[in-house]
Image: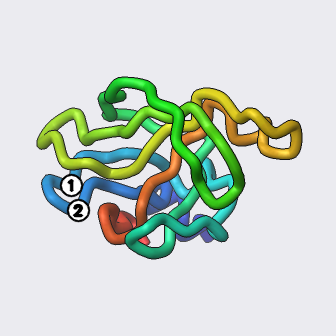
Amino acid sequence: MADHQNLIGPRLYSCFNCRNILSQHEHIVSKSFQSSNGRAFLFSHVINIVEGSKQDRHLNTGLHTVADVFCSDCGESVGWKYLKAFEDSQKYKEGKTILECFKIIKENW
């Protein structure tokens, strides 16, 4: 008997506004992040986004250089990308992207 997951494809996260695919469930690094708007997930790999300009931002875990990220289809702000972490304990976030849960929807669940 075939594996149910293989029949429907990977579990995906898409832009809530236009349903443009942004990432796969398997690329979640952590589900324990908070944004100013609520829960957020840290992803190791995202697609179909456009990065805004980089800026230094004081977040809950210290100073980081980040760039806001936007859906490449509709331009909706969906989170931010960590470009640089100034604290050694936060270096694991570099190159990873936060997607805010209220800005994404699940597909193929």
Residue 56: x and y in percent read 52, 33
- Give the CA distance from mark 1 to mark 2: 6 Å
User: Which one is nearer the viewer's eye here, 67 or 97?
Assistant: 67
Labelled disc at residue 19:
1
**Residue at left 61%, top 65%?**
33
Badge 2, how many Cα within 10 Å: few under 14, some, many 20+?
Answer: some
**Residue at left 65%, top 28%?**
84
Labelled disc at residue 89:
none
Dot 1 amino acid type: Arg
Q: Quadrant of the C terminus?
A: bottom left
Residue 108: x and y in percent read 38, 65
Q: Is residue 84 above or below residue 109?
A: above
Question: Where on the picture, by quarter, is residue 44?
Answer: top right
Q: Is residue 43 above or below residue 25?
A: above
**Residue at left 81%, top 39%?**
87
Residue 40: x and y in percent read 51, 65
Numbered-mark total = 2
Residue 20: x and y in percent read 24, 46
User: Which one is nearer the viewer's eye here, 99 or 47?
Assistant: 99
Question: Which residue, given by chain and number where applicable, does mark 2 sit on?
Answer: 16
**Residue at left 26%, top 54%?**
15
Left or right of residue 73, residue 104 in this image: right
